[in-house]
Amino acid sequence: MARQLDASLFRTVLPDVLGASFHESPEPTIDISTPGIRSGVEIRTVFRRCYGVDVRRVRFTDGLEWPEEGWCERRDITASASFEAEYVYTPPSGPLEGALAKFWEDLLEVGPIGVDDEFWEHGGDSLGTVETIEFLNQEYGVRIDYFEVGDKFTVARLAGLIRERSLP
């Protein structure tokens, strides 16, 4: 049975969104049209705060327009929509990724964090970067330089650095 979620809350929180469709099969998904730049992490976080639903996939598409009330109908977009971008939540797959995700969830006070989610998109800042570097050094004996962090600061990347630099 599909949940009936009132779209007015989502529409109020993100007034610049042109239209959105929510469906739960085969996994909780939002199809969304927006004129500005939005991230899948942001949309997922807003949705979770509004409804308590952990969306696994956010597909950015063109052509959705809000009806007078409620969500856009899914059947209106599935046949002809061109998806411009897609965000898929990928949970940690092992103890190392789980520990790193948990550290960021505690540090940034958000969650759950997927292995491919960008640190910066969850509100990370330079102080959090320094704390992460110190955590890696203390917990795993791995040193990374502040300038190595760059744009792709993800749990997957950190786990890869730990594995790479922990080899004898």
Image: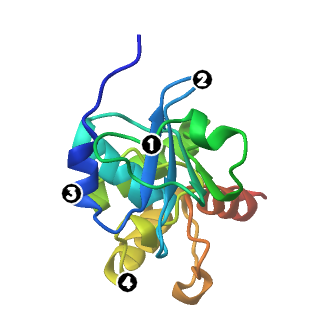
Q: Earlier in the sequence, mark 2 or mark 4?
A: 2
Cα–Cα gap, marks 2 and 4 = 38 Å
SS at mark 4?
A: helix
SS at mark 3?
A: helix
| Three-letter residue code for mark 4 | Ser
- Indicate the position of residue 38 as horizontal and vertical percent values: 46, 68
- Indicate the position of residue 151 as horizontal and vertical percent values: 59, 79
Q: Earlier in the sequence, mark 2 or mark 1?
A: 2
Q: Quadrant of the C terminus?
A: bottom right
Crowding at mark 1 (Cα within 10 Å: few <14, some 14-19, many 20+) = many
- Residue 80 or residue 12, whichever sits in front: 80
Q: Earlier in the sequence, mark 2 or mark 3?
A: 3
Cα–Cα gap, marks 1 and 4 = 39 Å
**Mark 2 touches mark 4? (CB < 8 Å):** no
Q: Give the residue at x 27% y 54%.
A: 11
In the picture of the structure, the residue carrying the numbered disc 1 is 72
Q: Earlier in the sequence, mark 4 or mark 3?
A: 3
Q: Is residue 100 left or right of residue 102?
A: right
In the picture of the structure, the residue carrying the numbered disc 2 is 26
| Three-letter residue code for mark 1 | Cys
Crowding at mark 3 (Cα within 10 Å: few <14, some 14-19, many 20+) = few
Residue 26: image quadrant is: top right
In the picture of the structure, the residue carrying the numbered disc 3 is 12
Cα–Cα gap, marks 2 and 3 = 27 Å
- Indicate the position of residue 166 as horizontal and vertical percent values: 69, 59
